Amino acid sequence: MTSLDELPERSRTVHAALLAAGVEPAIRVLPDSAKTAVLAAAALDCEIGAIANSLIFMAVDDHGNESPLLVMTSGRHRVDTDALARRLELTKIIRADPDQVRAATGQAIGGVAPTGHPEPLRTIIDEALADYPTLWAAGGTPHTIFPLSCPELIKITDGQVERVGD
């Protein structure tokens, strides 16, 4: 674990959010970027499925209103946006652009944490993440990451568990 003083500002925000949720933060700073599940798994020497990717989408309802949707998915597969939209009774789910990601999370693509956002986000948790005793999630930057369990992930995000992958 890295000391709080050594963490980037965005990661200190994540650290505070984890503490507030009752989860002991153990954020690590990695020497190289871990902005993809493949890079993160290689840096941590773990299975790619144990990487909890934080993906931001825009959820579109029947009236055409868009709202950010955080999908925490296992690094072992992709999100099936059509199937997930049907399960969530949405018109469609589309990938957020970098500006929408930053507006919703205060963080950049490749480093989005499951918590520490300006406002709580509706969150969907991939049911496949329960297959791993330890998950790894981004800590607010592409160079920071932290471990947690699936129950802790559900707790800190108030997430809804769903099948999201193919």
Image (cartoon, rainbow, N blue to C red):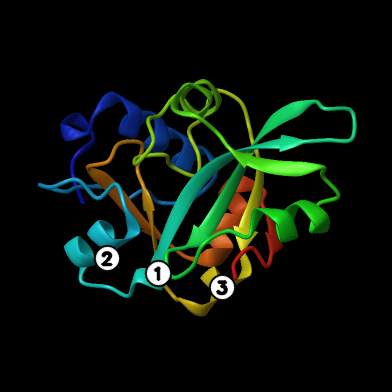
Q: Tag 1: residue type?
A: Ala
Secondary structure of the residue carrying numbered label 2: helix
Label disc, if present, on residue 127 of the rendered structure: none
Gap in angstroms between the C-alphas marked 3 and 2: 16 Å
Counting from the top left corner in percent of width and height, residue 8 is at: 24, 29
Q: Tag 3: residue type?
A: Ala
Label disc, if present, on residue 128 of the rendered structure: 3
Q: Indicate left or right for 113 with 34 as reference.
A: right
The reply to whether the C-beta atoms of the residues labelled 1 and 2 are less than 8 Å apart is yes
**Is any atom of residue 16 visible in this view?**
yes
> How many numbered marks does the figure carry?
3
Q: Residue at x 18, y 61 (%)?
A: 43
Label 3: few (<14), some or many (≥20) within 10 Å? many
The reply to whether the C-beta atoms of the residues labelled 1 and 3 are less than 8 Å apart is no
For mark 2, what is the residue? 41
For mark 1, what is the residue? 50
Q: Tag 2: residue type?
A: Ala
Q: Residue at x 26, y 44 (%)?
A: 144
Counting from the top left corner in percent of width and height, residue 140 is at: 36, 36
The reply to whether the C-beta atoms of the residues labelled 3 and 2 are less than 8 Å apart is no
Which callout, 1 or 3, points at the residue further toward the start of the chain?
1
Q: Indicate left or right for 105 with 36 as reference.
A: right
**Is any atom of residue 27 visible in this view?**
no
